[in-house]
Amino acid sequence: MHSTILVTGGAGYIGSHTLVALLEDGHRVVVLDDLSNASPAALARVGEIAGKPVQLIRGDVRDGALLDQIFAMHPIDCVLHLAGVKAVGESVANPQKYFEINTQGSLALFSAMQRAGVARAVFSSTATVYGAPEFVPLTEAAALRPESPYATSKLAVEYMLAGFARAHSWRAINLRYFNPVGAHPSGRIGEDPLGEPANLFPYIAQVAGKRRQILSIFGNDYPTADGTCERDYIHVCDLAAGHVAAVNYLLNHAMPGECPAVNLGTGQAYSVLQVLAQWQATCGFDIAHQIAPRRAGDVPSYFANPAGAQSLFGWRARQDLARMCADHWAWQQQNPHGYNAD
Ligand code: WQD
């Protein structure tokens, strides 16, 4: 069935990969993005990969009048809500920004959906809603202990979406991402962080690409096998496929009123040193690194139990760490300055 999906934040890292997957699955897409942390070049390249042009509506997800216009002009079957801000550290310093954009933005969007009678939504949430876990792997039933305004702003939206779903018989899903990395195998779209990367993969990529001098490993005295933190890294194309599976589930199988939370992870954890070793094997040279003090707020280890996504909508991650590094490295090499050159 061909459906029309509104993707907020569609020009971003996860959004662009998700658009490719949606288009390849036969869906039509409409993108709303304010380009605050994204480039229109990403959408042009999505169009290239998928062989179909992608229309951008440039605007703010908090703009109710614009949302009303979009829903009036396009027969939207489902909304994929990815637009938001995502820097944990920044959210501690500036919580207002996170509640305005993430939480108020979502309220504006869900309210406009309600006015327009659009009754399906997938929300881009995060595994940081779990905070420091008591047990791993994390199932969706694990305790929720968000530790930053970023995580709180996302969890508030999960509850909000569940409330709208129950009240108005929507079909909805909250997707909790673990650590998305990698890039499309074409090397044409990928993660293009503004300024100094805050995350491990883009940082290593820029050191490998000689754009930065040295990787700092934040702590090697954690209670893990090699002393460095362990995370559940997931290939961004697997994550994108998870969105398509979630959308198709909402279109074809979900019950009105339901709004489950679903982990998108691999179920496998790798330490910072294991990731670095794989990067070095992929590149074929040593990547400069040093041990640095712990970064505030990091927890030693967490990873998903991804069984929920498998049983609900038949999805599981397929790509291994070697593939994540190879695809991320190809993107970095082909686009040493991100989309800037376009
Ligand atoms: C991974 C590991 C670092 C950089 C964050 C967000 C989370 C989610 C994904 C959105 C940690 C170490 C990192 C570096 C390092 N985003 N590291 N040197 O912190 O698990 O998750 O991104 O939802 O919300 O919190 O990912 O990639 O920043 O760090 O040693 O230069 O790499 O300490 O152990 P994190 P990350």
Image (spheres, grey):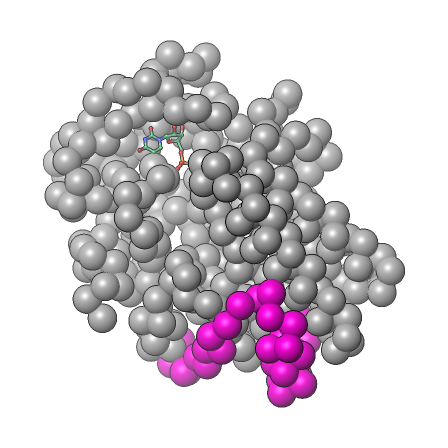
Q: Residue furthest toward the bottom?
A: 73
Q: Residue 121, how many percent across, how many down?
A: 68, 63
Quadrant in which the C terminus is drawn: bottom left
User: Considering depth in this image, is 199 or 52 the residue closer to the camera?
Assistant: 199
Quadrant in which the N terminus is drawn: bottom right
Asked whether residue 18 is in view, the answer is no
Looking at the image, residue 4 lies above or below residue 123: below
Count numbered badges in the picture: 0
User: Considering depth in this image, is 68 or 216 the residue closer to the camera?
Assistant: 68
Q: Residue at x 63, y 83 (%)?
A: 69
3 left or right, relative to 279: right
Instruction: Determine the quadrant in which ligand 1 lies.
Output: top left
Q: Residue 312, how many percent across, how many down?
A: 70, 52
Q: Residue at x 35, y 28 (%)?
A: 272
User: Considering depth in this image, is 311 or 207 the residue closer to the camera?
Assistant: 207
Q: Residue 100, how many percent across, how many down?
A: 59, 53
Q: Is residue 192 magenta?
A: no
Looking at the image, residue 308 lies above or below residue 112: above
Magenta range is: 50-78
306 left or right, relative to 321: right
Looking at the image, residue 3 lies above or below residue 261: below
Q: Residue 15, how many percent across, how many down?
A: 47, 62
Q: Residue at x 60, y 65 (%)?
A: 62
Asked whether residue 207 is in view, the answer is yes
Q: Residue at x 25, y 39 (%)?
A: 204
335 left or right, relative to 254: left
Q: Is residue 67 magenta?
A: yes
